[in-house]
Image: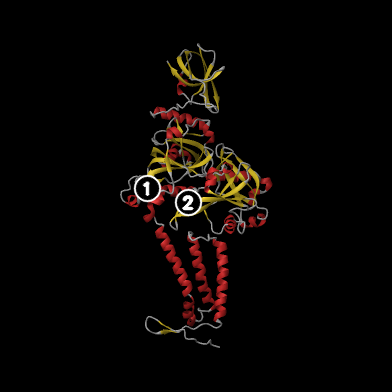
Amino acid sequence: MDPIKVDFSKKNGGGKKEIVIPPEKAALKIVLSIVCMLVFAVVAFYVMLPAVNFKEYDFYLYLGMVAASYVVFNGIFSNVMAKPEYIPYVKKRAIVPGVIIGILVVAVGIGYLVSSEFFRAKSYSEIITVNNGSFTEEIEAQDIESFKDIPKLDNDSATELANKALGDLAEKGYVSQFTASAESTQINYNETPVRVAPLKYASIIKWLYNTKEGLPGYVIIDMADESTKFMDATVKYSTAEYFNKKLSRHLRFEYPTYMFGDATFEIDDNGVPYWICPRLDKTIGLFGGTDVIGAVMVDAATGECVYYDIDVFRTDESLKWVDRVYDSDLIVQQYNYYGKYRDGFWNSILGQKNVITTTQGYNYIAKDDDVWMYTGVTSVTSDSSITGFVLVNQRTKESIYYPVTGGTEASAQEAAQGRVKQYNYTATFPLIVNIDGQPTYFMSLKDASNIVQQYALINVNQYNKIGATSNDLSTCLDNYRKSLKSNGAEIIVDQTPVVDENDEPAAETLTATGTISQIRTAVKGGDSYYYIKLDSNAAYFSIAASKDETVVILNAGDSVTITYSGEGAIIAADSIKIN
């Protein structure tokens, strides 16, 4: 039986009336459409996980999809594909959802405009505060001992070692069930730079078998000596899960209005695993100026969540073990806003005076028991040289810019690879270190399997001329110092007086002058040490060749002056001068 035709007519643009014919049981189909829309809203929220927050783009998209779903369901239940005469009716039912979608689009458009860099350039430039530093005064000079605390691995190398560590636990069956996550986190663990790599399930089938018990632990990779250690721990909440224990879903249900950045896997001083989940806010207009205002700490075993404001991470000593609250990409974005807009919007496009930007890439270094992100800084008009580099504390966002001129990290990587091109090694992203007052790029050289084979030191200013590579770090450092001297680079020796724990001056610097009666040598830690006895002193003076190259050319009978401090049968010398 044909449905009753009700005249919901209206005139179209041509003056003719459009007959609006409701389908049979129209009221029931409206109810069914609303029910299906609500079901869709629940499912879409479970999948999309938008923050219920009008500063979140995805929330507008979610609301628009829900509104549009009502129109779709109404059309399905009205069977418009088979009965096109119902299309005018469905179009009439789509007016309210269409208005809602239109309002959402307008709101997003207005929000974008009031947040735009064109109108708010000054605010964007002030989202991060950058202090200036002195490279030679603030960056501690490296010697072979302090190099043991310098990270020598990148994320890819750490992941390779982590999977190897799982392979060594074949008796536990871990290698067949789990793999190391490709996203490890560099932290300071008990004052040692390490990466912690969470596990993930080898496949969805392995997830089905193991999800009840969770992941069995994580891997610690020592960034300095490249050793690994598997740590037993229960991890039931992670990015590797699929349903309610998936970290992002667990957070959304606990904090429906919070906007979150990328979570990082960390461990406290006792090795207990946590997820550090930064809470974001838009600080400029409606959508601009993304910044961190706090973080949620999620216990990886129990899922227990605790929220702290950002100031707590900066001041509470009990939370100092947390190393990463600010994401590296967010830091780079904020610094680039600072470098681009500090002299105004139009200057960033036209004159571009003093406009700077970060280089392509970043790395991490331990400093003051915190993890600092490092990246080079270059002028927007040059892509082959840096004007300096910036260090940013990933817990506090303290930022320090050091003016240093020279080649970019990419140039240094090419120079290092060119020195060993016969091996086809790949250089890790460099760090800048202080070698005898000279800004120097340090990097590791990896083979095709991401295993570190050699180390490289490349001078920042003369990257094509001064540098060294070796599979032994001590030899690399020694050869680099020789390269500095042979090329006439200025050597700056730290003259800061050493003080003891009571702030009292250390032992007085003394000198001994005489004729060498004996010279003996020994190798320690890959470095050559010389033991010199003078006819004027009963003690032996010891000094490494890497510390003062003069010692290599000394002979018995030479007259020298030795600078030293301390006493004993064997005294460490500071320098040797031939008279």
- Residue under the image location 46 percent in, 47 percent down: 331
Residue hosting label 1: 342
Dot 2 falls on a residue whose secondary structure is: strand
Residue hosting label 2: 291
- Disc 2 marks a residue whose amino acid type is Asp
Which quadrant of the figure has residue 208?
Answer: bottom right
- Disc 1 marks a residue whose amino acid type is Arg
- In depth, the one of 511 and 325 nearer the eye is 325
In contact (CB < 8 Å): disc 1 and disc 2: no
How many badges with numbers are in the image? Answer: 2
The x and y percentages for residue 120 are 39, 54
Q: CA distance from mark 1 to mark 2?
A: 18 Å
Instruction: Identify the image quadrant of the C terminus.
Output: top left
- In depth, the one of 145 and 19 nearer the eye is 19
- Residue under the image location 55 percent in, 77 percent down: 30
The x and y percentages for residue 317 are 57, 41
- Residue under the image location 43 percent in, 60 percent down: 111
Q: Residue furthest left?
A: 351
**Is 83 located above or below residue 468 in the figure?**
below
Residue 547 in view: yes
Q: Which mark is residue 445?
A: none
Q: Residue furthest top?
A: 535
Dot 1 falls on a residue whose secondary structure is: loop
Does 219 sit left or right of 349 as displayed? right
Marks 1 and 2, the one that precedes in the sequence: 2
- In depth, the one of 139 and 522 nearer the eye is 139
The x and y percentages for residue 467 are 43, 34
* Mark 2 Cα-neighbour bin, 10 Å: few <14, some 14–19, many ≥20: many
* Mark 1 Cα-neighbour bin, 10 Å: few <14, some 14–19, many ≥20: many
Residue 472 in view: no
Does 568 sit left or right of 208 as displayed? left
